[in-house]
């Protein structure tokens, strides 16, 4: 069968693929240590479950308005106002089936053949594939571990052409854990305004921040940048609700309307029950999130310290999200029992087959020097896993 050309441009999500392999091995009874999964290991908080149950019992199980129920859009507007000081009207907020779906609707509404979108690397895997699916060109902007993956204004400007339509930023960042401070965001905002770019600000890890850091949304840095920013967020990461599939976009009315029209012709509304659950998460979820992030913080210190003790491995302390992103250049070029370890994928394959440790290699994130380990897993798994990783790497010669 002759398929559309666009399907040949993309690959299935490699993070989801690695997580599926690890789960399949575990199902066969293999003692797999899974650092690949990009979701909180906590159970969804009780008030959220109760709201979903109530929705089912009361028959709230039919189609809703395609762009989301007023109650949830209202709760999102309230959240953005009280937490970020941002002002939106209902017509500027679209609820979708996860933040990934919000981003996809946005790519479809904004991008076409000939358009360029700038993506700082290392980056979340779906940004570039979603651009490719919509015939646009992903222009990668490399950043460096040495300066905390900062975006340098000159480097950003060098990548802007007459075709550049948008820039994606993701702070805190998956996979690096880097966060963008106000000064850097101001520099980015100035450039975006000057070059008439849409800024897509993926703030899904906004609440997973450490060391008392406060989240800054680029949209708060003045009316000019607010008018061209689409804030993307959702309940998956902050409230351990990855399976419920609720994300949202807030931004310029014409763009949000277009995204809503696309959604009305593709998925229709996000799940009615999940929308009620998301209202409860936004209203009552804060204490849960605080506890979860405090536990992530403890694990973060343990995993980073453990990784830094392994010869050939060095790991920055992530400022947000729940991923360690160690540099493994020091072990590349060595040999394992089944062949050379020349890149992160070779290493991830060796670790999975030989040591039954699932990690995600850096290449799909745009890094040839790193692997990603999620610490959204138990402390016991982390300490056992790091020990096993050290032993496995010692076997390389
Ligand atoms: C998890 C994740 C998302 C999407 O989350 P949804 O479950 O689709 O809401 C978006 N961006 C980044 C960087 C993520 O890690």
Image (spheres, grey):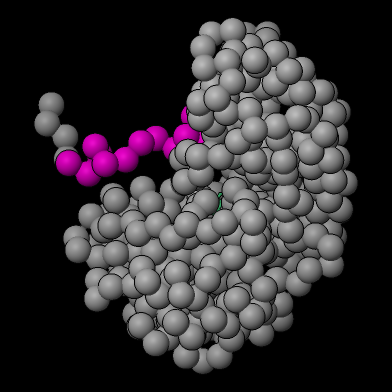
Q: Which of 375 and 75 lies nearest the eye of the viewer?
A: 375
Looking at the figure, which quarter contains the C terminus? Answer: top right
Query: Residue furthest toward the bottom?
Result: 223
Tell me the residue at 64%/56% (across/down): 146
Instruction: Name the dominant secondary structure of the magenta segment.
Output: helix
Answer above or below: position of 262 versus 156. above
Q: Quadrant of residue 91?
A: bottom left
Q: Position of residue 104 (x, y in %)?
A: 39, 56
Q: Residue at x 61, y 72 (%)?
A: 76
On whether residue 255 falls in the magenta region, the answer is no
Q: Nearer the viewer, residue 176 or 75?
A: 176
x, y percentage for residue 314?
A: 72, 41
As displayed, is residue 372 above or below residue 210? Answer: above
Q: Which range is magenta?
A: 5-17
Identified at 60% across, 59% down, the residue is 149
Q: Nearer the viewer, residue 302 or 322?
A: 302
Q: Nearer the viewer, residue 209 or 334?
A: 334
Q: Position of residue 11 (x, y in %)?
A: 36, 36
Image quadrant holding the N terminus, namely top left
Residue 273 visible from this viewpoint: no
Whether residue 212 is visible: yes
Q: Is residue 138 left or right of residue 89?
A: left
């Amino acid at each position: 069968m002759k398929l559309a050309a666009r399907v040949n441009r993309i690959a299935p999500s490699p993070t989801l693929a690695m997580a599926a392999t690890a789960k399949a091995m575990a199902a066969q009874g293999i003692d797999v240590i899974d650092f690949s999964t990009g979701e909180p290991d906590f159970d969804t908080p009780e008030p959220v479950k109760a709201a979903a149950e109530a929705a089912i019992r009361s028959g709230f199980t039919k189609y809703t308005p395609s762009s989301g129920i007023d109650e949830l859009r209202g709760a999102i507007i309230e959240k953005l106002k009280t937490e970020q000081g941002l002002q939106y009207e209902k017509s500027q907020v679209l609820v979708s089936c996860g933040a990934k779906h919000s981003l996809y609707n946005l790519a479809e509404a904004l991008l076409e053949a000939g358009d360029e979108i700038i993506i700082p690397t290392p980056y979340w895997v779906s940004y570039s594939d979603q651009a490719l699916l919509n015939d646009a060109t992903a222009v990668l902007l490399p950043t460096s571990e040495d300066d905390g993956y900062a975006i340098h204004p000159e480097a950003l400007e060098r990548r802007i052409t007459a075709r550049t339509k948008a820039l994606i930023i993701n702070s805190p960042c998956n996979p690096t854990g880097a966060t963008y401070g106000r000064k850097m965001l101001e520099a980015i905002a100035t450039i975006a305004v000057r070059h008439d770019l849409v800024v897509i600000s993926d703030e899904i890890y906004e609440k997973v921040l450490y060391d008392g850091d406060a989240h800054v949304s680029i949209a708060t840095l003045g009316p000019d940048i607010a008018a061209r920013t689409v804030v993307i967020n959702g309940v998956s990461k902050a409230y351990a609700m990855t399976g419920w599939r609720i994300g949202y976009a807030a931004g310029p009315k014409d763009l949000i309307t277009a995204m809503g029209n696309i959604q009305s012709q593709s998925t229709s509304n996000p799940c009615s029950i999940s929308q009620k659950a998301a209202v409860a998460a936004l209203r009552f979820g804060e204490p849960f999130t605080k506890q979860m992030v405090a536990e992530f913080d403890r694990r973060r210190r343990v995993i980073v310290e453990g990784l830094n003790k392994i010869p050939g491995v060095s790991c920055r302390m992530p400022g947000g999200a729940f991923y360690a992103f160690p540099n493994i250049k020091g072990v590349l070029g060595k040999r394992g029992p089944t062949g050379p370890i020349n890149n992160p994928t070779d290493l991830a394959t060796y670790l999975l087959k030989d040591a039954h440790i699932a990690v995600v290699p850096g290449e799909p994130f745009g890094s040839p020097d790193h692997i990603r380990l999620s610490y959204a897993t138990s402390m016991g798994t982390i300490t056992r896993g790091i020990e096993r990783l050290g032993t496995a790497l010692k076997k390389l010669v």
